[in-house]
Image (cartoon, grey):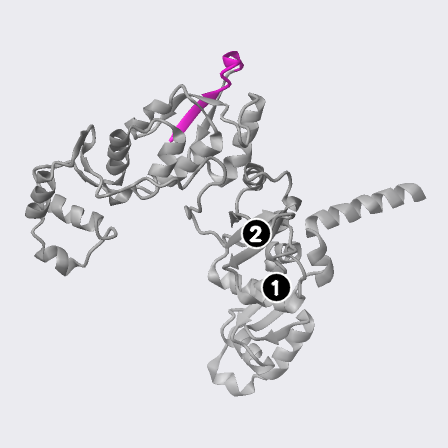
Amino acid sequence: MQAIVSNKAHPDWGCATIPLPIPDEEYAHCMELLEQLEIGGATASDCRIDRLDHSLAVLDVLEGQEVNIDELDFLARSIDRYWGNEQDKFEGMAYKLGIKDIQGFINLSFGCEQATVITNFEDLNRAGREHYMDTHGGGAPVDVLNQLDGEKLIRDLIATGTGTVTPNGVIFDNGFRMEPQYTGQNFPVYYDKVYLMELELAPVTSEPDSSPMTLLLPTPEKRLERLLERGGYRTAEDVQVRTWQSELPDQINNCLNFRREGLIELNRMYQAVEKMNDAAMDGLAAAVLMAKPECASQVQHLAENLDFFEFIPNIKTPEELGRFMIQQSGHFEYDPNLDGFYDYAKYGEQRVREQAGEFNELGYVGYTGAMSLDELMMEDPVEQYQREQEEQGQTMGGMA
């Protein structure tokens, strides 16, 4: 989808084109575009939709309305998962229920897949099978479907007279009742991508039984700030973490105190690791055991500088390390005929000394950076180098 939005009070200021769903890497830029038009508030419905390019005709009703941009983005994310005839179900139920506002569309997007829509009356057997799956959690064993008389099932459904004719076909709600998953403040929990952490947040001054807010990380920092504002928090310091569930390895989770970590720092850490594959994540866990970070920002710096670490899984002794390096690393021309003449243990011990390496529960990890591990975890090495160069230039200038 794509929305062209403007400031209703100042149409002469121009408009902004917003891709939907908003890609994470473009979120901050899109908010800047809206700020230039003095719209796009975190909680305000101030973006007039001049045009909405999409494939769902039922959403045409939103054109001309003023909406909240994050609500529009959440709706786009929610329906972006649709495949097959699920889009027809969404549209059919929207027509049946007469939904014309964005909050209603968001709530409809949760659960309308259980409805049945008939778009092709020439293949009633297939329609019957689809109806059976609609009413059985979205799937069924192949042998059950093969024995099913789909045509009879769908004819019996049609005979009930409970169908509603819509532009997308005949829709049967199958008992669907739209629940108020979204009431206008905090968005429902929705996994539209792989998230590494789920947090339950509450105000610092709240009672233990107060209603919490659920937050999924990582997310663009600008979105995080706006989600907190939507939840009624002025800053990240206004919230306390009640419960959490992290998908990172235990070696990383165990070095963090999630109740005391800042949300911004946690989010940046998860952003630094979200695209790591399993091998890189194991390497980071081994580096954490070696460096012993004490907070999320230190883990973030380790993740951003993982190239300075050499990790070899399942290696427990200098001899195993030397054997791996000589036989498998590709750094040497190994001759199996000379295997008895290699001193694997001695070479392994030498490499451990050179890298100040260690063997831990995950394998061998060595460090090849020029600065100390403490310095590496304090700040970004590039920023530190630039700062040192600036300080050196100032000192030299003073001496001159």
Give x and y (percent) for residue 44: 52, 27
Q: Helix or strand or loop: what does disc 1 sit on?
A: strand
Q: Which residue is drawn at 60% across and 70% down?
A: 365
- According to the image, label 2 marks what residue? 272
What span is in magenta? 1-13
Circle nearer the N terminus (2, 1): 2
Find out whether residue 9 is within the magenta segment: yes
Question: Is residue 129 toward the left or the right of residue 352 in the image?
Answer: left
Question: Is residue 257 toward the left or the right of residue 158 in the image?
Answer: right
Name the amino acid type tagged 2: Ala
* Residue 83 visible within the image: no
For this rendering, which residue is in front, 325 or 72? 72
* 10 Å crowding of disc 2: few (<14), some (14-19), many (20+): some
* 10 Å crowding of disc 1: few (<14), some (14-19), many (20+): some
Q: Which residue is drawn at 73% across and 58% down?
A: 375
- According to the image, label 1 marks what residue? 309
Which corner quadrant of the image does residue 3 belong to? top left
For this rendering, which residue is in front, 135 or 118? 135
Q: Whole-Å distance between the Cαs marked 2 and 1?
A: 16 Å
Find out whether residue 372 is within the magenta segment: no
Q: Quadrant of the C terminus?
A: top right
For this rendering, which residue is in front, 249 or 97? 97
Q: Which residue is drawn at 20% across and 50% down?
A: 133
2 vs 1, front mark: 2
Q: Are marks 2 and 1 in contact (CB under 8 Å)?
A: no
The relative height of residue 79 versus residue 388 in the rendered view (above or below) is above
Give x and y (percent) for residue 248: 52, 60
Q: Residue at x 57, y 29 (%)?
A: 32
